[in-house]
Image: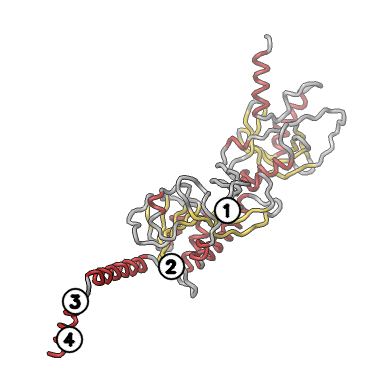
């Protein structure tokens, strides 16, 4: 006992005999090592990660679903998973509730030191810099386009609308102040199937994006170290779709353009035109039509409508041919034969040679010009 105490006294005396600069260096090393130890406890340099997920729609659910199932995988890369949503009635919130995932409202509170990395999918809100800095490995975004092409909120719709044959899923790091401009960590090409709709393409990219996210998280440190900045060459913007996009301009749009417009937005916003100053919604698009008119001497102008009895289709003349629809909505839903019997047949019987104002589907632009000509004509 006394020997031990004597040894302790000798150690203390040796410490007192150490030069001041040496004692200061030792204390500094201890503080630095403690800080490094504390940091390693707060954020691991490798998976499994503590993840905060921010999303809203069904596209986002696919990534959240794979992150959720990974927690029980033999190759686990997700340790803890919590969710942020913008409102109560969105698919991401419903999925989180069904799977007992902790939920946060926007903006999230109590984030400091609780997460390693954030994941944003279809969230639609610019994240402030102060929030991004709270994640040691940043915040990742799953974006369904071949960035920098189609930055913005509606990349899938514009991919279809503009006839792109190739797209991609991109995993980028979020940067503050602007959408979809962060460095690319991972990217996988995707061939756009011929005649696919925006819904079909979106579903395929959601699945591919979820798997690419898992791949990125599994090697996150290496991905960040080798990230690739986006260039401005080829950058395009994909604004939200809206009802104004649904008006068909028969004089300007080709069969292919109308086909792409329908596949891009038709399931959400019906294509529209006008008939006798009333708005008509065009449904059940059948694509390009090949028709022969009974009177070959008739001058066909864009917007002309022909009922095709054999296929029960309304064929409408556009810039370079005819496109068909099987259903219209004019006050109520009508099949092609109903519209022909109730409206088109009577109008065509009233028309005399040279009259073109009736019996046409008129573009909104064309209708406005016609109204101006009528209003400016002498009485």
| Whole-number angstrom distance, CA of label 4 to CA of label 3 | 15 Å
Q: Quadrant of residue 104?
A: bottom left
Q: How far is disc 1 from disc 2 in space, using C-alphas?
A: 28 Å
At a point 48% along the width and 60% down the height, the residue shown is 64
Mark 1 or 4: the one toward you? 4
- Estimate how packed mark 3 is, as few (under 14), some (14 to 19) or many (20 or more) residues with alpha carbons within 10 Å: few
Question: Could you tell which of marks 3 and 2 lies nearer the N-terminus?
Answer: 3
**Pointer 2 residue:** 45
Tag 3 secondary structure: helix
- Identify the mark nearer the N-term, 4 or 3: 4
Pointer 1: what residue? 144
- Dots 2 and 4: beta carbons under 8 Å? no
Q: Residue at x 61, y 37 (%)?
A: 245
Residue 7 circle label: 4
Name the disc covering residue 17, or none: 3
| Closer to the eye: label 3 or 1 | 3
Secondary structure under tag 4 reads helix
């Amino acid at each position: 006992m006394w020997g031990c105490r004597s040894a302790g006294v000798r150690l203390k005396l040796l410490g007192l005999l150490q030069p001041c600069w040496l004692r200061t260096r030792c204390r500094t090393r201890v503080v630095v090592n403690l800080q490094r130890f504390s940091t390693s406890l707060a954020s691991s340099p490798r998976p499994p990660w503590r993840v905060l997920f921010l999303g809203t729609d069904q596209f986002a659910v696919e990534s959240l679903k794979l992150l959720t199932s990974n927690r029980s995988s033999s190759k686990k890369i997700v340790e803890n998973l919590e969710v942020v949503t913008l409102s109560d009635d969105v698919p991401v919130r419903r999925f989180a509730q069904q799977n007992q995932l902790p939920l946060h409202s926007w903006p999230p509170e109590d984030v400091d030191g609780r997460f390693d990395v954030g994941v944003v999918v279809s969230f639609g809100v610019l994240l402030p810099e102060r929030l991004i800095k709270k994640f040691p490995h940043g915040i990742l975004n799953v974006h369904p386009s071949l960035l920098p092409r189609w930055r913005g909120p509606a990349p899938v719709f514009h991919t279809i609308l503009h006839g792109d044959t190739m797209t991609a899923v991109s995993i980028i790091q979020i940067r503050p102040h602007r959408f979809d401009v962060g460095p690319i960590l991972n990217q996988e090409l995707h061939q756009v199937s011929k005649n696919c709709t925006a819904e079909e393409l979106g579903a395929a990219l959601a699945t591919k994006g979820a798997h690419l996210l898992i791949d990125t998280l599994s090697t996150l440190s290496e991905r960040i170290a080798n990230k690739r900045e986006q260039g401005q060459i080829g950058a395009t913007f994909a604004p939200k779709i809206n009802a104004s996009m649904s008006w068909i301009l028969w004089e300007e749009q080709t069969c292919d353009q109308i086909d792409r417009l329908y596949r891009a937005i038709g399931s959400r916003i019906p294509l529209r035109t006008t008939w006798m100053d009333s708005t008509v919604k065009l449904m059940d698009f059948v694509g390009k039509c090949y028709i022969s008119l009974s009177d070959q001497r008739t001058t066909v102008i864009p917007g002309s409508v022909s009922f095709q009895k054999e296929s029960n289709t309304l064929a409408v003349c556009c810039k370079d041919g005819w496109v068909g629809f099987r259903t219209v909505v004019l006050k109520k839903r009508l099949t092609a034969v109903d519209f022909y019997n109730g409206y088109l047949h009577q109008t065509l019987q009233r028309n005399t040679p040279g009259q073109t104002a009736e019996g046409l589907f008129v573009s909104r632009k064309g209708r406005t010009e016609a109204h101006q000509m009528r209003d400016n004509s002498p009485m």
